[in-house]
Amino acid sequence: MYVADEDLLEIFGVAELEQARKQLVKSLPHVSILKSRLSGLTSPLRGRPPDYVRILVFLCWMQTTKMRQRGDRDFRQLLSKQLGEDFTGFKMNGLDMMWEHLQEFLWRVYGIELVLPDVIPSISRIGRTLQMAFPTWRDKAALRKLRQYIPPDQLLDPLVIANRVNTSRHLLGDTMQSFEYNFEKFDTARKRGHREHETTPFWHAWYAVVAEQASIEEIEVIESDFGGYELFRVPPVGERISITTPEEVAKLVPKPLARLIANGLVFLESLGFGRYRAQASAPSNIVLIRTSKFRECDPSSIRSSAAVNASWVVAAFRGKIGETAPTTRGKREFGWRDGIRIGGGAYLGRTPLTPSISGPVPEAIKVEAAGKPVALIRVGDEMAMAPGVYSGTVVARSLGASQEILMIARANEVGEARRLAFDLARDISEDDFHQGTAPSTRTELEIWNGDRVSPCDELVTIGEGLYERTARGLPLSEAVEIVRRAIQFTYDHPSEWDILRSFADAGWLEPTFLRHFPARRLVQREMSACSVNDNTVVVCGPTPLAVIDRLSVAARAAGGALETWNGASSWTLPRYVVRIPDDRARREFLRRAILNEMPAWGRAEPDRADSSDPHGFRVVGKLVRERGFFAASFDKEMTDGLYRIERPGGNSHFYYRSVVPGKSDHNYVSPSVALLSHHLRLGGDVFEFRDGALFARAARVKLPSSWARWASNRSLCNPGPSKRSGVWRYEYPAGGAAVSAIAKLVPVRKQTGQTSGWRESFIRSASNRDRKIYDNRSRQVRAAAGMHGKN
């Protein structure tokens, strides 16, 4: 029974192990009941379901937790320390009763065979429990002995480990049955390949022993929204662990990298999906640099920068820092790389999100799909499949070797049991206080009458990839990289941020902030329905190809039909409506489609802010209004603008403080909400309504996603990027009633037949090209460029 400390953190939703331990102990029965169970006075009732499993889980966990000291070896002493009760000499007759009752129950009800170790006579009544846990101190002692017989450069070679264990049983001494069982699981996973062994408890235990002496961890920098970054330390196995500064892991990383951390300049290597790995060898144009060194850099050599915290900055330079000679790449192993897994072993077969193929000689790689050759495209050091949709077995061959994978054309539908739901105890919505609200609670249709366009293939591919990857939650940086990969061969496209935002505004995703440490995550929204009347149902939520296929069949079975309402551009997701003859058929469709009515909208309000004093916080970024990004800034005073602030040494997310002279300062959690509220506080028209579309007049300002979904439900047209005006612009197609409701919350300039002001006439005039004026309403310098609205 493998119960890791990380499992407890996830089960109880806390960040500290001590908190999880207290929650686990609190979940146990009262100590008098517990003693009665352990002594055997209260035995499990035959034929009844087990009500003691958490006791067994607790007993196995307390033997393997990292909180256990090296000298703690006595079972009863461990129990006494955890529960604060004296168990010296206590009878443990009830342990065997619980294990044997569980064994009988699992076989009788589920057909699962629980193989129990034999009772060890020398260890009265607790030997079986000692053997069930892994890894106990005996297992760790055996692994430490094994470590002495393996060369340092082969400590993480699974084949070497397996061979040494198989040939050194006499050196390891008497190991427990759990050691043998977990080693067999590891060895079987190793033989299956594809690094499956790294997820086994045996490998985790082995790495923990290796890490006691070897410094082999890595540092990853992960991109977040609005150009921000977060730091993580990454062991060779296990999950990423959030850190505040690189200095925290200086003793865990290789010495060359530790020296770079001490010097304040760490080179970063791109891993894709918005991730970068710290490296100690080759210089790079992307670096993790200390703030003091960053201030000394020539501003003209900096392409972009963003603060990680008050002490470190991620900066991209125009040229590699410290480069003395061209760097060379080592030969890559032959095999498939990246790709989006579908189900157990298939991959999404829609380019360019299909896996790529790498090898020592990329030009020698050949690929066949369904027995026919596939054209390849050289992308860096790898080969990518030619544009298309692939389904079936795909084989790659190179220099006599071959590897095959299975590709399918669309994502599998995600069941509710698998989907990670939005949880207020764990997540903070990007909409913050706007979540679930709408400018009006009225839901009647106001169908948009503009020209509609079918979605492009790239958008469909992005939707399939995001739907599959967000089932259990997805870091925002990885979602952005999926979009970037999907549009890499498209000549003219909107920004990846606008594309990703369109999925949130269409109801597919809920952008969130984790409460316990600074990280962004996308959570997949639940499928629901909005019944407009007895004959019309608007489908709300993610609608990939598999879901649409099922809803279409359910609609026909209920006597109705599924309608598709495309958006205003090829980069806008469609809406789906079910038309049915009467209310009875409507209820039948909802039953067949397993759709619940969406919750009622709450009443929206323009702003709700925290005006508390940010004592203990430091400025790490300031909004560049012309671009809508937060640039690295370390001002000691916040005088005027929107600032990104953090608490040094804390483990909380960033805050955003709006400072407007003459008004009280406001704090916000969400950067998108902070942008909108900050522009509202500045005054002037924030949005404009023209030609049936609402759009922002300031960079990166967006309506809350809840408002966008409400407007989309009325107009049957999702918001998204559009190029109707000659430049890419994020638009909300809406009717007059919806815009009037929004205008009561945020200032909206509406198109009228009256003559526009002199400022608009000035910037529209071709004769004034390259001349500039200061617009005191929007507090921006505006340039005349012969195009209305260009700043």
Image: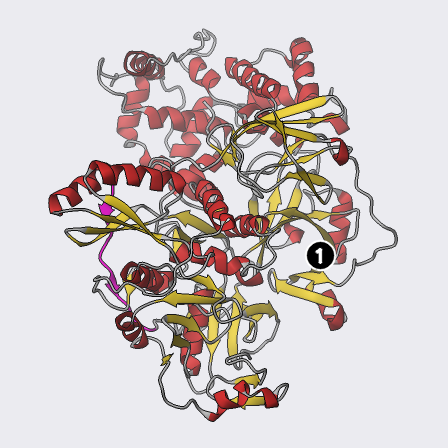
Up-down relation of residue 107 to residue 392 (above or below): above
Q: Tag 1: residue type?
A: Ile
Where, quadrant-wise, is the C terminus in this rendering? bottom right
Residue 290: give x, y in percent of width and height: 70, 62
Residue 512 visible in the current orientation: yes
Residue 159 in percent (x, y) is at 68, 20
Q: Is residue 668 visible?
A: no
- Could you say where residue 514 lies in the image, as x and y percent from the top left? 44, 52
**Which quadrant of the view contains residue 388?**
top right
Q: Nearer the viewer, residue 709 or 50?
A: 709
- At horizontal 64% and vertical 25% (from top left) the residue drawn is 403
Magenta span covers which residues?
594-606
As drawn, the residue found furthest toward the right would be: 325
Where is residue 213 shown, x and y percent of the image?
A: 70, 33
**Residue found at x 30% / y 31%:** 31
Identified at 35% across, 50% down, the residue is: 425
Up-down: is 16 above or below 790?
Answer: above
Circle 1 residue: 286
Q: Main secondary structure of the magenta part?
A: loop
Left or right side of 343 for 433: left
Residue at 44% across / 73% down in the picture? Answer: 696
Quarter of the figure that contains the N terminus: top left
Residue 467 among those drawn in magenta: no
